[in-house]
Image (cartoon, rainbow, N blue to C red):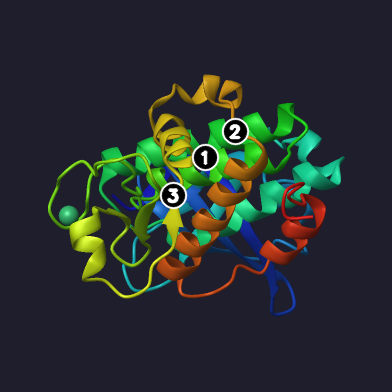
Amino acid sequence: MTSIRTEALILRSVDFGESDRILHLLVPEIGRLPAIAKGARRSVRRFSGTLDLFNHVKIQVDIRRPNALARLDQASLIDPFIAMRSESARFALGCYLLELFDRLAPERGVRSDMQRLFSFALGALRMVAERAPDLRLRTLIELRALDALGLRPEFSRCVRCGSAPEGRGPIGFHVGEGGVLCDLCGAQADAIPRIHRGTLRALEQGLRLDFERLDRLALSGSSLAEAHQLLTRFQRFHLGVELRSESYLDRVLRSPAAG
Ligand SMILES: [Zn+2]
């Protein structure tokens, strides 16, 4: 495989030198692919209007040298996700998702996984573009994005012993180990947040529902605030950094319960 024709989603686009542009692409066969578009800022013809954030494009890209940047030879627009740019909540949530993919999508990952990730990414952007995003939609899409990126939290079985936690009270959730701990295992762990059952059930449902039906899931008030806090801790722990787009998104979509 040397020069391939495929599709891509533009995750990041930065000027480079006097006339080039560096792009981070999400590509269905490969996963994350950094590439250089030579002369992109000089030649209006070759890349006109195609290299902006959110764009879903058809590309021809040269990936001949494994240790060098891929070279983007051609790009044409399939869908610019215009609606994403016209409203602040959509824009903020869209940027947040792109950054999450850019940080966590593997480079040259397993083909079938990367194809699934790519179609998830398009579906998620479409959902954001068609809705008026609120904290609930953000929380549910973020949960599914983490799952699609290989970071699926475990909400129903203890991550140490596999048992289903008993009783009805809140259950400990170990962010580093990625899921709930039963009381026995939880007693041996350092202080961990305890999450209400209703919140865990809603999150579990959020993982199982058809993606198109996701926004019908009931999640509000204190459960929503708790789910949002938990996913934020989970995401930050596994990423190791705070995403640049996160504080902007937080300002745009404030939690009603958190004030
Ligand atoms: Zn256990």
Q: Where is residue 132 drawn, in percent x and y?
A: 78, 32
Mark 2 and mark 3 residues within 8 Å of each other at the beta carbon: no
Is the CB of mark 3 within 8 Å of ligand 1?
no
Residue 34 seen in render: no
Q: Where is residue 217 drawn, in percent x and y?
A: 56, 25
Q: What residue is shown with label 2?
A: 219
Q: Compared to 161, does 4 lie above or below?
A: above
Is the CB of mark 2 within 8 Å of ligand 1?
no
Q: Nearer the viewer, mark 2 or mark 1?
A: 2
Nearer-the-camera pick, 130 or 43 = 130
Q: Secondary structure at mark 2?
A: loop
Q: Compared to 91, does 125 lie above or below?
A: above
Q: Residue at x 28, y 43 (%)?
A: 111
Q: What residue is shown with label 1?
A: 121
For marks 2 and 1, the one nearer the N-term is: 1
Nearer-the-camera pick, 255 or 238 = 255
Q: What residue is shown with label 3?
A: 146
Q: CA distance from mark 3 to mark 1?
A: 11 Å
Nearer-the-camera pick, 176 or 241 = 176
Q: Where is residue 133 drawn, in percent x and y?
A: 73, 37
Q: Amino acid at mark 3?
A: Leu
Q: Compared to 2, does 58 lie above or below?
A: above
Q: Secondary structure at mark 1?
A: helix
97 relative to 67 in the view: left or right: right
Q: Secondary structure at mark 3?
A: helix
Q: Residues within 10 Å of mark 3 (few under 14, many from 20)?
A: some
Indicate the quadrant of ligand 1 in the picture.
bottom left
Q: Residue at x 77, y 62 (%)?
A: 248
Q: Where is residue 187 drawn, in percent x and y?
A: 24, 67
For marks 2 and 3, the one nearer the N-term is: 3
Q: Residue at x 35, y 57 (%)?
A: 172
Q: CA distance from mark 2 to mark 3?
A: 18 Å
